[in-house]
Image (cartoon, rainbow, N blue to C red):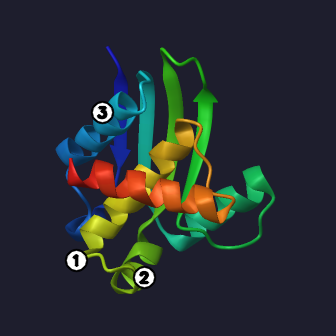
Amino acid sequence: MADFSLSIPSEDASDCPSEERVISLVNSVFKGEGLKWEAISVVLADHQAVLDLNIEWLKHDYHTDVLSFLLEDDPDAIEGEVYVDIETARERYAEFAATSITQEIERYIVHGLLHLTGLDDETEDEKTAMKLLEDKYLAA
């Protein structure tokens, strides 16, 4: 049986998606990409926590909306962690036509999950393709 965990700061839970919704997103993304997952952890955090991880693990001294760490890349047993900056989602949700902060957080979660499947968004074509997949999985 696959292992899933969702961590939400208790003081910030009002805008966050439910655990059931996040599990549904995880299942949709991995099934849609033809992969199986063994252990996925989604952590909804603040600016500082995500910045600290970005500096420590990627040597990037700047804020970002989501970080993904692939721990095991066996296509039959993906293991990974997704860290979402919920403060960034709250600041930026209106810029990206999301109808709610919760939906923006869900977009960041799906984006991070897509990175765990091996997709990237370095080029404009990759960004466009990833945005289309985000829309697809968010609508599921």
**Where residue 61 sits in the image (x, y, percent)?**
77, 70
Local SS, label 1: loop
In the image, what residue occupies the spot 49% across and 17% down?
77
Mark 2: amino acid: Arg
Is 62 positioned to the left or the right of 30 in the image?
A: right
Sequence-wise, the earlier of marks 3 and 2 is 3
Q: Residues within 10 Å of mark 2 (few under 14, many from 20)?
A: some
Q: Is residue 53 left or right of residue 60?
A: left
Distance in Å between CA atoms under marks 3 and 1: 23 Å
In 3D space, how far apart are the residues under numbered discs 3 and 2 (Cα atoms)? Answer: 26 Å
Give amino acid for label 1. Answer: Thr
Q: Secondary structure at mark 3?
A: helix
- Distance from label 2 to label 1 (Cα)? 11 Å
Q: Percent x, y for residue 133?
A: 40, 51
Question: What is the secondary structure assignment of the residue under circle 2?
Answer: helix
Q: Amino acid at mark 3?
A: Asn
Q: Earlier in the sequence, mark 3 or mark 1?
A: 3
Identify the residue at image location x=59%, y=37%.
Answer: 118
Residue that label 2 marks: 92
Disc on res. 99:
1
